[in-house]
Amino acid sequence: MQLYRILPLLLLPAAAAVAQPALDGEPARIFHFAHAGSPQQRQEILNAIRIIGEIQRSTTDDAAGALVVRGTPAQVELAAWVFGELDRAPGQPAATAVESYHYSGEAAPEARAFFLAHFAAPQPIQELVNTLRSVAELNRVVAYMSNSAVLVRGGPAQVDLAAWIVHNLDQPAGVLRDAKPLEYTYPDSSSRPATAVRMFHLSHAVTPKAIEDLIDAVRSIAEVQRITMDSATSTVTLRATPEQAALATWLIQELDRAPASRVEK
């Protein structure tokens, strides 16, 4: 189930945002950190604002405990949303597992913040980020490790695919997974549409080296380039044409066998 809500700017946390004069029609705003106390936390929030909002005129002032941004009115409003989502007290839960923001009038109008329930270590979170970048082709994706949050911004179809990926990867450890791959249809309108998304929970090829070898085989034989792994959950996720996905499914199911059950065909 995908849960989200649209947050009007007036409902954003106070975040101590102070309006500043505009320069060349671009307003500036100062945000005072309430909970991000370390330089690393503040740098991660700054990086999120730069990546999600594409705001290069942004910086932190550690002495003042503040973050300063300057951009278009829409960019500054998006920065306020990002800041409010990330500058939370440690362990403070989000209102929902997924929160959304609509960035109107742009090619990448949808932003979402995913608050992970089962991923906390940096490696699985980074692998999730890599999967979103590769499979959903999202350029604007960033993690905030302190709150196990991942923010994305892209087209509606990209963000919906990201939500499906996050939901199916962010699962409790040790849960028995279905041997059949999970399937998702992506509305790709390119000349060679990669509409088939598949997620495989591996049973035997579970070491990082075994998963990497399996991925190399799929890339080479099925010519699938959008394929990544999540070593914490022994999962492989790919996106390809239906024909490529069918061949990749056969390959993965043949290679992900116990050694004694492998039969040369």
Image (cartoon, rainbow, N blue to C red):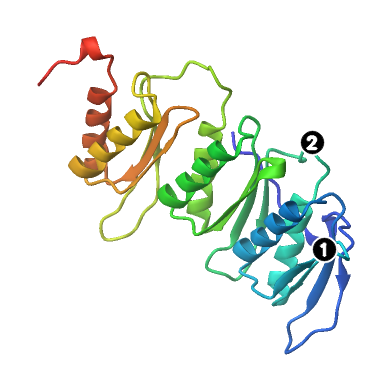
- Of mark 2 and mark 1, the one earlier in the sequence is 1
Name the spot of residue 254 as percent of width and height, x first.
Answer: 22, 23
In the depicted structure, whether residue 164 falls above or below residue 226: above
Quadrant of the rendered image containing residue 24: bottom right
Instruction: Return the residue at label 2.
Output: 91
In the depicted structure, whether residue 141 falls above or below residue 131: below
In the depicted structure, whether residue 44 falls above or below residue 219: below
Could you tell me which secondary element the residue under label 1 belongs to?
loop
Q: Which residue corresponds to the image point at 75% horizontal and 56% vertical from the top-left?
A: 42
Name the spot of residue 129 as percent of width and height, x first.
Answer: 52, 46
Q: Which mark is residue 92?
A: none
Pick whichever, 212 or 161, lies toward us.
Answer: 212
Instruction: Return the residue at label 1.
Output: 62
Other-residue count near label 2 (Cα within 10 Å), few / some / many at <14 / 14–19 / ≥20: few
Circle nearer the viewer, 2 or 1: 1
Could you tell me which secondary element the residue under label 2 belongs to?
loop
Determine the residue located farthest toward the top in the rendered image: 260
Amino acid at pointer 1: Asp
Q: Is residue 220 left or right of residue 172?
A: left
